[in-house]
Amino acid sequence: MIIHADMDAFFASVEIREQPALRGKPVVVGGRAESRGVVAAASYVARQYGIRSAMPTATALKRCSGLIVLPGRMALYSEVSQQIQDIFARYTPLIEPLSLDEAFLDVSASTALFGSAPQIAHDIKQAVSDELQLVISMGVAPNKFVAKIASDLQKPDGFVVVEAADVQQFLDPLPVSRLWGVGKVTEKKLHAQQIHSIADLRRASESFIRQHLGQYGEQLRQLARGHDPRAVIAKRDAKSISRETTFAQDISDAEILRSVLSNLTEQVAWRMRRQNVRGRTVQLKLRFDDFHTITRALSLGAATHHTCDLWHTALQLLNKEMASGLPPIRLIGMGVSGFDTDQTHKQPDLFDTPHNDEINNTTTRSEAESIDKVTDDINHRFGNKLLSRARGLRRPHPTPARPKIVRE
Ligand SMILES: [Mg+2]
């Protein structure tokens, strides 16, 4: 089964989460009317005024004079997007993102471990709500095409499951414009021939379809019958994996920085193991209170995805920078690149990697790798925040339930 997961009014919802005073108000994220900007995302309250994405902001303001127009914060949205994808990744490595806020997930191989596809979709929806305070709509169906329609059908806060046996019954009454490839022009053409619903098209004769729809006709008819053979293609061409955190207040405390870096490293390492990639180059990113940003990198002797190797390298980079005295830090990030593309090379020489005997005083390498495995197993089952290393537990004070992200 395939899940199509799609955030509701994503950019606008993130803004409302960050600024609760905006709740219940008409909000859009978009360009300024004076600079001929357009709406990128509209809250559901704004949509009640007929405001839609891609509409000029000037038009939107005419429809709703009290409209709150916010500039976009892409760095924040991509950070949240990564957090959403991390939740997906607990259930399947087969994730095909379509944009920052929607993705297809193939969960066919995950059901033995996590329950049925609808159960998985439900758990993901719950996790996004509990952990990120955001709403995601889910469509569950035997293929991509039907799953995508399903996720859209009850938005916002949608949850629609279409079992294989019900696909035709589900599609038949829907307007033909729901079919991929049926735009305004084709729709008009079909309406002129009294084809309004998907059922109408499905029942049309082969010659009719060839005459009116040409080379795409057969494809549309397959879709109308609920056939869509396309597989979910996981994004495997990533050149690096990274995580970063922006602090609500600038941080100078070295212990807090190390602790946050440890958390980021665990998240990156976990994601690498999940995607079965190993990397050679560890990068540290620091942004200071004046927005000046530096990156520092260090390469390991062999590609790895073990938390201990990545952590020691990241820590080395941070310690070196801190030794020279740093201004207060606004953002810290870590990433790994230099992926080993040779998938047959699964077991790097353990004794070739640095820090082999200094993981810490009491932990051997094989123990450290077992920790990775146990952590991964538990986090897969219960969410990746449940188990983490104690050094990652120190938080900026006062401890926010969710780190508030400062406007950039
Ligand atoms: Mg969306």
Image: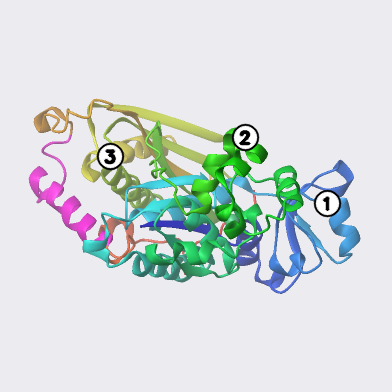
Does the residue at mark 3 contact the one at mark 2 (Cβ under 8 Å)? no
Ligand 1's quadrant: bottom right
Query: Tag 1, which secondary structure?
Result: helix
Does the residue at mark 1 contact the one at mark 2 (Cβ under 8 Å)? no
Q: Which of label 1 and label 2 is nearer to you?
A: 2
Does the residue at mark 1 contact the one at mark 3 (Cβ under 8 Å)? no
- Would you name the residue on which mark 1 appears? 57
50 falls in the magenta region: no
Q: Where in the figure is residue 30, as x and y percent of width and height?
A: 75, 50
Q: Earlier in the sequence, mark 3 or mark 2?
A: 2
Amino acid bearing label 3: Leu
Query: Label 1: few (<14), some or many (≥20) within 10 Å?
Result: many
- Would you name the residue on which mark 2 appears? 214
Q: Nearer the viewer, residue 148 or 294?
A: 148
Residue that extends furthest to the bottom in the rendered view of this protein: 24
Task: Please identify the quadrant where the N terminus is shown.
Answer: bottom left
Residue at screen point 75% across, 65% down: 47
Question: Is the shortest distance between ligand 1 and the CB of mark 3 under 8 Å?
Answer: no
Instruction: Kindly report the secondary structure that dominates the magenta region of the rendered protein.
Output: helix
Relative placement, left or right, of 183 versus 58 is: left
How are the colours assigned in the image? Answer: rainbow
The label shown at residue 310 is 3
Q: Where in the figure is residue 309, as x and y percent of width and height?
A: 23, 39
Amino acid bearing label 2: Gly
Observer able to see residue 60: yes
